[in-house]
Image (spheres, coloured by chain):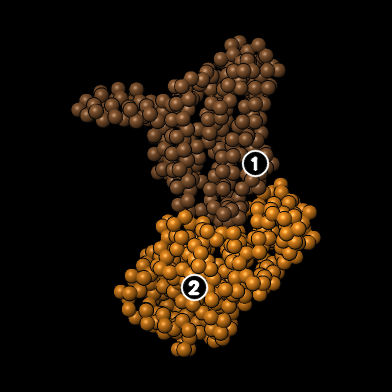
Amino acid sequence: MHLVRIKQLNATNTPIRSLSLNIPAHICYGIVGASGSGKSSLLNIIAGLHGEASDHVLIDSVPANRATQRIGIVSPRIQLPADARIDELILNHAQLYHTHVDDIRSAFQRAIRLCALESLVQQHVRLLSIFNQRRVVIAMALVQKPALLLIDEPTIGLTASEQKVMIDILEGLRDREMTIVIASRGDAPLDSLFDMIGVLANGTIIAELDQQHIRNLPRTILIRADVIPTAAYEHIVALDNGIVVTRRNIVLTGEGVRALAQILQVLLHYNVHIFAIEPLNHPLADLVHQAKQPQVLAHRYPVRAVTSPIDESGASEETAL
Amino acid sequence: MIKLLMLVLRDHIRGQRILVELSAMAFTAFFVLRNLTESHATQATLVLYSFLMTLYTTSVLADSNEQPAAMQRILAMPNRESLLFAIGGSALIISSVSYLVLSAVGTVLNPLAMPPLATTFLALPSVLLVIITAIILMMLMTPLIATTTQRLIILALVTIPIAWNIVVTTINLSMPQIDSALVAALTTVWGIMLWPGFAVYNHAVHPHYDLVSIIMHLIHAFVMAGLYLIIRTWFQRKALTVA
């Protein structure tokens, strides 16, 4: 059964174009895409905040803008008032959803427990780190016991140890009769959370990976492609140390294989033809067929930026393969 | 909805934005009301103060509630209109209270220049309508509700009719061939839209009730109701942002 249904969605003033998406209930769904691919816009639309487009998003068969009370949203853009106290913030938010005092108190205690904020409830926001503030925002979203929790870039700007704790908190939220949708740029640590991943490029979902595909990603992946432009090259090599890029080939090893979806959407973004993904039975290998039809690809993923290809000297790197 | 209104009000007070209203009130009381000698001038000052202060308060409330942290609350509401009521209600409360407090302070500082109590009470409905007018006009011009184009159109619709005498003279000088019927029609439209508004403002300064003044209040209230419907439609279509 699907909790979220979106069919052929076009949203004005956002990158979202012809997007179709079905998110099953009670899973953790990852929306992975590069900056500007439309992740945050999609979350806002699903949350019922886009006046027109949200009409076409169904949450349990109800248009999203009429189901907002069942939706919680967490974003790094939410800046809490510096002079407020944590317990006061969360209790005030709980009051908007619950009328009975006992309900407010129990919702508050539950949210505090799930976000491990017991020792911080008496503190003011101005004394909290970014990491702790983000936990408070999650707690605020949880006091309503949402059926759908939308989280934008939960680990952005956090240290490695903070990322680990954040993932533990998010892991603790699973299996609580709640569907979680997390938008990320493809941070490898988050992959362990996802039951499904939707790859977002140029405002549309270009591929979906289920849990089995995510868990069974091969140890080494080779992508054979056309000439890779400099901008795409720089984007891809920055993703992980386990990625080697030459003029026409990309090799993913170790943790680098987890960045496959994001690399593919970077290549599509720059209109780079993908000739093959090896091993050949890889779930995203069907993109190769699209890559062999340039007119279809160019129509679906128009080039946004014109970049110069890597110069000939870059070809010497190919010997590394 | 009442809880949301209380939160919006409390944010405004705790965020110390209320200090601007208090400072303006103190300035008006000590530097303007204290030196007045005539009750109509005092009443005019009070009404003008309320109008300008309401414009400021509404603008600040709308801007501060456009932030993602405040916008997160809109999810808790059954519909978006709740936020409009919360912002408008908060502006109405702040402006009405500051009007009453300023009247009280003026009575202490310069009792002889204050209008009689009966006049103050008679003027209250008109003052209330003036404050609501300021709230609706400013809401139409905030980024929370309207796009840049819409705000420019509203600004033009307010300023051009107010300066209509100058505009008509300019039109006649620069484009004498323009159809005079069009100018006359526009003059009539602006008249219907603005004349009752000015009448209500005038009535708030010189309160007296007769059939004409009541009709003026009703026409102005209908115009405001129409503008509120525009605000509601724009806000329902507006793409808001939390993430």
Question: Which residue is denoted by mark 2 in the rendering?
Answer: A22
Question: Of helix, strand and loop, which one carries label 2?
Answer: strand
Q: Which residue corresponds to the image point at 62% horizontal and 77% vertical from the top-left?
A: A192
What is chain A's hue in the picture? Answer: orange
Residue A101 appears in view: yes
- For label 2, the crowd category at 10 Å Cα-Cα, with few meaning under 14, some 14 to 19 and many 20 or more, is some
Q: Position of residue A83 (x, y in %)?
A: 71, 47
At label 1, the amino acid type is Leu
Q: What chain does mark 1 sit on? A: B
Q: Camera-side residue: B135 or A132?
A: B135
Q: Report the residue at 52% width, 59% height from top.
A: A66
Horizontal side, residue A276 vs residue A70: left or right: left
Q: Quadrant of the C terminus of chain B?
A: bottom right
- In this structure image, what is the colour of chain B? brown
For disc 1, the neighbor class at 10 Å (few under 14, some 14 to 19, many from 20) is many
Three-letter amino acid code at the position of disc 2: Asn
Closest to the observer: B74 or A313? Answer: B74
Q: Secondary structure at mark 1?
A: helix
Residue at image mark 1: B9
Instruction: Indicate whether B137 appears above or below A205.
Output: above
Picture quadrant of residue B172:
top left
Residue A249 image position (x, y, % from top left): 44, 81
What is the distance, in whole Å, between disc 2 and disc 1 at their CAs? 40 Å
Q: Pointer 2 indicates a residue of which chain?
A: A
